[in-house]
Amino acid sequence: MTMNLYTYFINNTGRQIIKCAHYFPIYERYFSRYVNRPVTFLEIGTGQGGSAQMWKYYFGPMARIVTIDIRPECKAFEEEQIHVRIGSQSDTQFLQSVLDEFGAPDVVLDDGSHHHDDINVSFDYLHPRMARDGIYLAEDLNGGYWPQLGGGLRSPNNFINRCKGFVDEMHAAATLYGDEVVAETDITRTTSAIHFHDSVVVLEKTPYLNHTMMIIPPDDPGRA
Ligand SMILES: C[S@@+](CC[C@H](N)C(=O)[O-])C[C@H]1O[C@@H](n2cnc3c(N)ncnc32)[C@H](O)[C@@H]1O
C-alpha cells in the first residue's frame, strides 16, 4: 500500500521538512499524475533536504529530483535521484545552467527565499522554459502582502497580484470583444489553468487548447 504525502510528512523522522499542512492535498491534486513517471521535479529551496527525500519517495524510482539553494552546505543532501545545485533563484545564469544540465523541468515548486523579487525572477525565467505541459507551483505566497518580502496588498510585485493579471492574459482573446483589450502574452499561449489556493498558486501549462465551441449533435433530435 502506498502512503500518501501527508502521512509521510507527519511520520518523518529523517531530515527536516517545513511545509504547511494544507499544502498536502494541493500537492496530491496537481502532482499525482507524475507518480511513477519519469518526471524532472525542480524545487527551489532545499532547506534541510527533507522535502527532496519526500518527493523522491512520492514520485518513485523514475523521478529525478533537482533542488537549488544559496547555502553551499545543502550539497551534502545529494543522494541517488536527488541533485542539489548551489546558486540563487534570482540568478538567471545559474538557472540556465540548471536547465542545461537537467533539461526542462516538468514541475517547478518555488519554496525558496519567499521574497517576491526572487519569486518573480524565477517565474519569468523558468516558466517559459519548462515542459510545455508542466506545472508551476509557488507556495508561502501569503508573504506577498508584506512589504518586507517585496509585496503589499496592491503591489504589482506581489506575485499573487501578477497571477490575477495572468487570469486576464489567459483570456486575452475574449477581451478583443470587451471594453479593454489585453495583449496576448506567453501566458495566453501556454496556460490551461491558474489555481488560487490559500498561499499557493498553481499554473498549468498546455501546448494547445482547443477553444472551439461545439454543438453536438448539431441539430437537436429531440426538438420538434
Ligand atoms: C523554507 S526553506 C525550504 C524548505 C524545504 N523546501 C522544505 O520543504 O523543507 C527555504 C530555503 O530557501 C533558501 N533560499 C533563500 N534564498 C534563496 C535564493 N535566493 N535562492 C535559492 N534558495 C534560497 C534558504 O537557504 C532555505 O534553505
Image (spheres, rainbow, N blue to C red):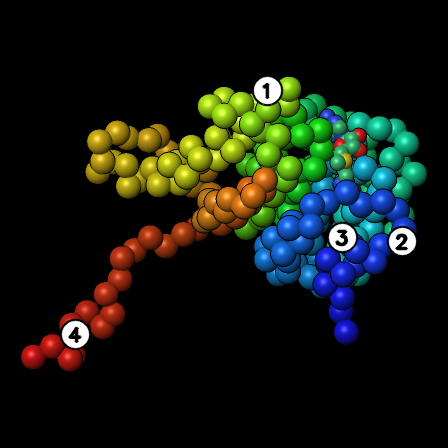
Q: Secondary structure at mark 3?
A: helix
What mark, if any, has residue 55 been given in the picture?
3
Q: CA distance from mark 3 to mark 4?
A: 50 Å
Residue type, numbered disc 1:
Pro
Q: CA distance from mark 3 to mark 1?
A: 32 Å
Q: CA distance from mark 4 to mark 2?
A: 61 Å
Q: Position of residue 76 (x, y in %)?
A: 92, 38
The residue under the point 55% across, 36% down is 128
Residue type, numbered disc 4:
Asp
What mark, if any, has residue 212 been given in the picture?
none
Q: Secondary structure at mark 4?
A: loop
The residue under the point 28% across, 36% down is 175
Residue type, numbered disc 2:
Thr
Decide: is 43 above or below 55.
above
What mark, if any, has residue 220 been given in the picture?
4
Looking at the image, the residue that sits furthest to the left is: 224
Callout 3: 10 Å neighbours few (<14), some, many (20+)?
some
Callout 2: 10 Å neighbours few (<14), some, many (20+)?
few
Quadrant where the C terminus is found in the figure: bottom left
Lower sequence index among marks 3 and 4 = 3
Q: Secondary structure at mark 2?
A: loop
Residue type, numbered disc 3:
Trp
Q: Secondary structure at mark 1?
A: helix
Lower sequence index among marks 3 and 2 = 2
Q: Position of residue 53 (x, y in %)?
A: 82, 51
Residue placed under numbered mark 1 in the picture: 147
Q: State the residue in front, 80 or 73.
A: 73
Taking the image as four quarters, which one is ligand 1 found in?
top right
